Amino acid sequence: MLPGGHLLSVLIFFPAIGALALLMLRGDDHKFIRIIALVVSLVEFLFSLWMLVKAPLGAAGYQLREYANWINQPPINYHLGVDGISLFLVILTTFLTPISILASWKSIEHRVKEFFVMLLMLEVGVVGVFLSLDLFLFFLFWEVMLIPMAFLIGIWGHERRVYAAVKFVLYTMAGSILMLVGIIWLYNATGTFDLPTIQNMLATGLLALSPREEMLLFLAFFLAFAIKVPLFPLHTWLPDAHVEAPTAGSVMLAGVLLKMGTYGMIRFCLPLFPGAARRAAGWVAALAIIGIIYGALVAMVQPNLKKLVAYSSVSHLGFVVLGIFAFHNISMQGAVYQMLAHGISTGALFLLVGMLYDRRHTFEISEYGGLATPMPKLAAFFLFVALSSLGLPMLNGFVGEYLVLLGTYQRHWGWATWAALGVILSACYLLWSYQRVFFGEITREKNRTLPDASAREKWILVTMAIVTLWMGIGSTFITARTAAAAQDVIDQVEPQHAFEAAAPKATTPRGTAPHTKRDSASAAANNIPTERLGLR
Amino acid sequence: MLPSVIDAYRVLPELVWCGFGVLVMLLQPFVRTRQFFTFLALIGALGGTAASVTAAMHAGPGFGGLVQSDSFSFFFRLLIGAVAFLVVLASAPYLERERLPFAEFYSLLLFAAAGMGVLASAQELLTAFIGLEMSSISSYVLAGYRRDALKSGESAMKYFLLGSFATAFFLYGIALVYGSSGTTMLVKMDSADLLHSTLFELGLAMILIGLGFKVAAAPFQVWTPDVYEGAPTPVTALFSAGPKAAAFALLLRIFATVPAATHFWFWAFWVLAALTMFAGNLGALVQTNVKRLLAYSSIAHAGYILVAFAAVTLMARDKSSDAGPAYAAVLFYLLSYALVKMGAFTIVSQLGGTGEKNLSLDDYAGLSQRQPWVAAALSVYLLSLLGLPVTAGFFGKFYIFKAAVNSHLMWLAVLMAINSIIGAYYYLRVIVVMYMRESSAEAAALGPVSFPIGVNVVLWITVAGTILFGLYPNPVINFILQPTLLGR
């Protein structure tokens, strides 16, 4: 029997039950609705932490598996599982949901019940995506999650919300329909939708795709994920969606939805089509690097604060894609870490921008200036978050970017050199925008009397700040769990490099952080052989 | 050979529908209560549906092979019976509102159902022709049932003229097929000579044109929007679900049983499918009238089903691969599609108001505020048409994609994917209007439109069916995947 009881099913469907309960609720007591939504999401968060206890530390392969037959023709199974990579993405999702609910406490005043129902349904879809081990099930959650997000943008967004919502759905759907064709094609070749089974067939040579077929399939999957990430030049839906979305929508969008794309690359593109991934790696890396630099440059010239943060996401997600396609254990772990760090930092940035919007109802940087005087606390938090986002050591952004660059450098030093430009540029646009918003003279009279952070906002921000700091100094907690999973992906994409890449190379200290990486990398090297035997 | 009792069992559903149709007609001068006729028609529709179980239990060829009672016809009889039942439920309040006579409407409806039943179970071309005429002539009258409305008259006229033209094609096709093969029995057209007979091919082409008209395949689709728009909305619901399913059933039977029909016909279906998808979806993009929009969308969906047909013919030709999943794709799609269109047109009919005035998209603005449950139900239908998971439409589309990819029709699959995206745009537009725009002042002042119990039952059944088959399609799929589906 598969271990773990039904924790993963509970994780997926508990928010759905909460949403259903909210729907059934008679009356329109906004406070009551908010409290129910918050309690549901907090309980869900605790459930997700329980995974940390139940999943063995540093093990490779999928844990806590659940398996049931669902549809017999064609054989589609309800197959769930979690590994080191999806584990933390689920926790990130369940962590950001209560934060989003708290952030919408005051700013959502009409159609309150529907709002929280949509937010919880979104959580269902996202957690389902991260936990599915059946291609069909994965696709199902991938599509299901579109509708709540489109409603969040389209009903509770700003002026051009409908345009942004429709653009978001059409872009994503265009990619995912081709992915569906790809999934069916793969099914035709293998006779199953089950991811571990297909991986097994690949490993044992039962499934051999011709190079052309493999490349087409890779592209069908990759396009869907690249749109979601979004990878340059498919990023044009993102600024619209972000600017028009309500704060909670932006937090969820940047925090977790974009990660579904990079997660898909790690989980599907690399292990299923290793040959095509290797051949495409150069092109993908080039696009990622263009994205890093382009995103940063465009962010720098944005007059709109929210758009600035949105473009910074394009830049940061470029690092993640680069880390993935460098096929190096350290850069892969860095990519995962950067996914989590970006979720927290950018989520916090969107929260802060939302708080400014709640006070002044504008995102224009020129409308602000000198805000540090009326609201010192908010200014301090903003600086903290901006520093974490630009990668200050001791904070979370640094670990991810550093690991990505370190790993990438060992495979292709040229890529790392170009990507490093992005680190410098991110410091420019974040600090420059911070200066224009919070320092200088107060140019608008209205800004003089703005209230500082309220108790609720302080709670949100302090929580985010603590997590930011903890991820910056306690990174081993996470890398110890992601190492094996990352190595497993690398092994599947580059079997010949398996042990060479895992060997600890960092014998000399490189700055403050390598200590942790070396440990985890060597841990991975020690773990893999036995674990792989267990897996296969 | 004289017909025996077992032959009667094998066409029992059609007999029940015809019988009740006649009964309703005969009672019309004597009984004046409207509820009575509604009740009688409901019993008739249900009775025929129940009788299809009897017919399925006595499976086999009836009347010396004119009709075939098998799982295939069982499936379609159930579908047609369910559609007739739902149309009766939905049309009672409509007829009341528009002050139209009840009895004739119901008897025409039941005759149409009987015709579709014959069409779906016919194993011989002249029988099929009778079925086609039975359902078509009733349909022409039903389309013009709102005599006072100009559009209804236009609808009936167009449908009648173009429809008879198409029927003539069909008949001519039968003549050519008979001339070349010496038989009108589908099962007897298996001689190897027919594989290279130009006359036979020509006959098949004529039949394909005739039936292509009935299923609204491009380039024979131009009548659809006008006829659908002008007809009384419950009748539109019937048109989009019933005759279409029956015509597809006959088409499937012909192209699955006759070896010569699978010879090189897949190219014809390929082209038809591609044209139909684009004609429907591009046409729907610019519509502002919800009824017309749904009419164009039903053209598009005929295109998706034709994709599966291309796969069916290709697989039947190659013989090596199993065509079962492709048939299943057609059947499942027709089921999911019928459920959704029934529900959607019922809502349109009810929201239209007296004289069907409120049909434009603007009238749907802010519907989610005025009538949240109706808006939610309509969204479920639209999402199913769009093919989003957890709805039956998703599995329908999935099975068609699978059939296409199975037969290596990659380009057709990609075209279908592109069309799905175009489709997503206009379905979403309706949802956007309902949820993201405010009601107009008049609509808000009028308040919610009342939904009588019969209409609510239709909505409940169709929504429940759409979601149930979207979560658990196993029973249906297992049934239609059985190897003896076509009674062989």
Image (cartoon, rainbow, N blue to C red):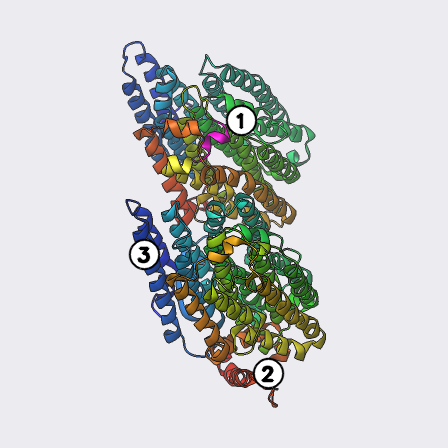
Question: In the image, which residues are magenta?
Answer: B359-366
Query: Is B133 displayed left or right of B444 in the figure?
Result: right
Measure the alpha-carbon separation of dots 3 and 2: 51 Å
As displayed, is residue B143 above or below residue A156? above
Characterize the local packing of mark 3: few (<14), some (14-19) or many (20 or more) Cα atoms within 10 angstroms: some
Q: Secondary structure at mark 1?
A: helix
Q: What is the residue that sits farthest to the right in this orientation? A: A414
Q: Which residue is mark 3?
A: A35
Q: Is residue B360 magenta?
A: yes
Q: Is residue A519 visible to us here?
A: yes
The residue under label 1 is which amino acid type?
Answer: Leu
> Camera-side residue: B217 or A387?
A387
* Label at residue A499: 2
Question: From the viewer's perspective, is B5 left or right of B237?
Answer: left
**Magenta includes B422?**
no
Label 2: chain letter: A
Residue A269 shows up from this direction: no
Up the image or down, B305 lies above or below B472; here it is above
Q: Are marks 1 and 2 on the same chain?
A: no
Type of amino acid at the residue the image marks with label 3? Ile
Residue at (35, 16) in percent of width and height: B103
CB-based contact (under 8 Å), mark 1 and mark 2: no
Which is nearer the eye, B143 or A127?
A127
- Residue B326 locus on image (x, y percent): 53, 45
Q: Write down the quadrant of residue A190 in the picture.
A: bottom right
Labels 3, 2: one chain: yes
Q: Which mark is residue B125?
A: 1
The quadrant the N terminus of chain A occupies is bottom left
Q: Earlier in the sequence, mark 3 or mark 2?
A: 3
Q: Residue B151 at x, y = what percent?
A: 51, 17
